[in-house]
Image (cartoon, rainbow, N blue to C red):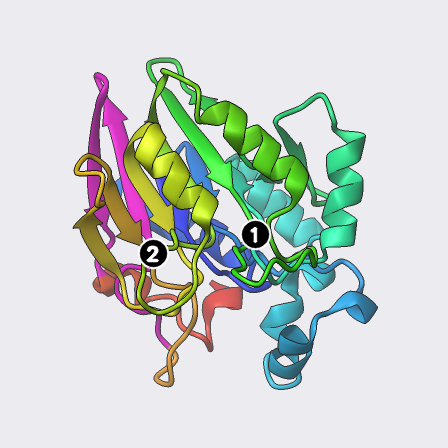
Amino acid sequence: MRIAIFSDIHGKILLPFKLVDLYQKETGNTIDFILQCGDMGAYPNIENLDKATIKHAQYDRDELGFHDDFTTVNPAIKSFLDELNIDMICVRGNHEDHDFLDHLEKENFQESLFPIDVYGKVFVCKSGLKQELKTDNEILSFVGIGRIGDRKGRSEKRFIQDYERKEIKKLLKTKDLFDVLITHDKDDSSQRGYGMTEIREVLDHVIFHYHFYGHTGEPFKQETDENGITQSIKIKELEFNESGILEKGCMIILTKENGKLDLEIVDQKLTNKMTKYNWKSQ
């Protein structure tokens, strides 16, 4: 089983799928699923954009990619996604239309994840619930925690909600071992003054092999978590830099074979083939 992992796509919903397609063609290795660590930019209605997204969308239409390409069927995109036949499973970030996502989450109250796009290829997993991805030979167990933390006790929808905290408290009691934790925010042990308390609690009480997160704007980084067990991976945001290329560590491949996990940082020689100027036509 191979999983491609991204973060902070900010409306470029199609780009992870395009990169996975490129990776498969360049390497001959099949990807089974995509995991995405939040800030999808899931805004179906332009009038619901937050201030930051409005600002960026004024000079970069890619910020509105969910609205433009994933709310009504584009035959070319549908054909591409159907042929690729890979699902992307996301956690919420802070830059999403949370009213839209809340409505879908309530509609799918019996499921641990729910589809959000017109093609049925993009899913959001509910915070704190146990999840599994399956192929014929392997099962990947993971948990997602979406949104961001707040030390001021605010309850706006970009911040973690009380109902999600209740699910996380249940998770803390589990004796299960998990392959992956995906979050948007990082834990709150940083000296930079932000992060989510609940992520720290989960990492201190539940065993994960890997924790992947985004949000912070920091470069790609891999280190052992302070729990001494989990490998903590800061995924570089899927953003084009001033030269129009993607930065190191924006695409990670996690392989599970015979129960063993391995990590690959996709080389920039590959990702550089998708630039700000050509990726939509690739």
Q: Amino acid at mark 2?
A: Ile
Residue 78 x/y as whole percent: 65, 45
Local secondary structure at mark 2: loop
Is 249 in the magenta? yes
Question: Relative to 146, is 215 on the left or the right?
Answer: left
Residue at horizontal 44 percent and vertical 62 percent from the top: 215
- Residue 246 image-quadrant placement: bottom left
Can residue 113 be seen at all in this image of the molecule?
A: yes
Residue wearing tag 2: 235
Q: Amino acid at mark 1?
A: Arg
Say above or below: 272 vs 174: below
| Outermost residue toward the front in this view | 152
Say above or below: 102 vs 110: below
Local secondary structure at mark 1: loop
**Pointer 2 local density, CA inside 10 Å: few below 14, some 14–19, many at least 20:** many
Calculate the distance from the C-alpha at mark 1 to the C-alpha at mark 2. Answer: 16 Å
Is 13 in the magenta? no
Residue 209 vs residue 71, the one in the foreground: 209
Residue wearing tag 1: 147
Residue at horizontal 32 percent and vertical 61 percent from the top: 190
Can residue 73 be seen at all in this image of the molecule?
A: no
Residue at horizontal 61 percent and vertical 58 percent from the top: 153
Residue at horizontal 78 percent and vertical 34 percent from the top: 106
Residue 50 x/y as whole percent: 70, 71
* Magenta range: 245-267
Residue 209 vs residue 279, the one in the foreground: 209
- Residue 59 image-quadrant placement: bottom right
User: Which of the two discs, 1 and 2, sits closer to the camera?
Assistant: 1
Residue 124 x/y as whole percent: 60, 40
